[in-house]
Image (spheres, rainbow, N blue to C red):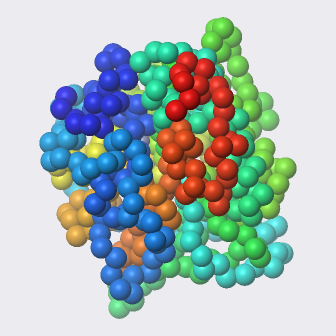
Amino acid sequence: MSKGRQTLLACALVPALLLPGCAGPNLQGRDDSPLPAANVSPGGQTPQAGDSQERQPDAKQPDAHPTETGARKPDEGGPQADQPHAGSPTTDQPGTESRQPGETGPASDRPGSAAADTQELAVYRGPVEHIFFHPLIAYPTLAFDGDAMDKGYRDWFVTVPEFERIVESLYRNQYILIDIRDLYEERVENGRRHLVKKELRLPKNKKPLIISIDDMNYYDYMRKNGNVHKLVLDGDGNVAAYSRTPEGNESIAYNNEIVPILDAFVRAHPDFSFRGAKGMIALTGYEGVLGYRTQDAASPHYESEKREALKVIARLKETGWSFASHGYGHRDAQRISYNSLVEDTLRWKREVEPLTGPTPVYVYPYGSRVETNSDKYAFLVRSGFAVLCGVGPAPYLKYTGEAVMMDRRHIDGIALEQQGERLAHMFDSRQVIDAERYRTAAKP
Ligand SMILES: [Zn+2]
């Protein structure tokens, strides 16, 4: 376990027992840490003249965060020998996956198209905001209890009231949720496929917004530290959040996790969603998905867990949610070997894709993107990923012809406490911050 600053930070916070490998997907949260290196530009490359991109002037500024103040050292994120479920080499050959026709194209099967089509639309040419969250802190007394993960939760998660205030403000500021698949289209020229920018036409005066949620797997550590336990369907087929309260009671609620909160918000404010779009859920596979432990085919619960997961996923898709790969074992694509990335990706495709369906989006764990001229990048593109999402301090969208690179802003305690100015056009972080996050610690 020699993972350098980032993991030391996380590991220092997390009891070893809770860590699936300590270098793995753990608090996790750090996980989708912002820019790994101050000198790596979003997308990991130097912008070329003529690139179709939208980058803010400050995009090269590292986020003001202790883990981002310098470049990673080569040994910093080393291979994770204790990776959970490190599978045996697979018989699948890399590169044999092909993109399904239509898979990367417009999502014509999305809900809500009819309503939006009656609106007056205008071409939008500004930056496209993409923000991401981790599952919400539903029980602050468990998250902020002075234990080893207290600070991690303060840094990398937001509470329910914080999320609600952010959504209210985004709505007031004329943002509208769009589907990431609205950003590009596939064209065939001279027999070759190209991904090109798609003209974005939105209701007048609205600004596009993509929300994604990472690690909505409800890992064991999350259940112990104040996140809900799983997503479930209620008797009407609507998505709710199941948990056990700190008092030990069962709870099925609509007001303590992103999915039901956003579902209700869009019901009340349909103009917050373009053609029914909600958010994108980025999943790993090593502890199952959405709180269902689908990772162990030998478990007596495997079939029932899978069946329930499939039902919830089907409903989520029907209601405007989409899915992305977040790797199987939450491994650092930049750090691991080519073969490990192949193995991890194929494992996701074998175990998670049958649940979520194929997805054109890959969300780099730790925000750790690979160079566009690398074999790893070529492999991800060959594997059918049309959009590769990193993490950055400002909107970044670049079309390479074969894929779309997009950065996301992390919205968490660090962002709320330290990046207020950068986020002010979307919400006032001072008014968002929940005093509950300081129940065990002094305000910075
Ligand atoms: Zn993650």
Q: Residue furthest bottom?
A: 190
Work out whether residue 352 or residue 434 is closer to the camera in this orientation and state it.
434
Q: Quadrant of residue 257?
A: top right
Q: Is residue 264 left or right of residue 246?
A: right
Q: Residue furthest top?
A: 247
Picture coordinates of residue 280 (x, y %)?
56, 52
Q: Is residue 108 left or right of residue 197?
A: right
Quadrant in the picture for the N terminus: top left
At x 22%, y 70%, the residue is: 373
Picture coordinates of residue 13 (x, y %)?
37, 23
Q: Quadrant of residue 97?
A: bottom left
Work out whether residue 398 or residue 421 is closer to the camera in this orientation and state it.
421
At x 21%, y 65%, the residue is: 374
26 versus 189 height, above or below = above
At x 81%, y 79%, the residue is: 120
Picture coordinates of residue 321 (x, y %)?
62, 51
Work out whether residue 407 or residue 297 is closer to the camera in this orientation and state it.
407
Q: Is residue 146 left or right of residue 37?
A: right
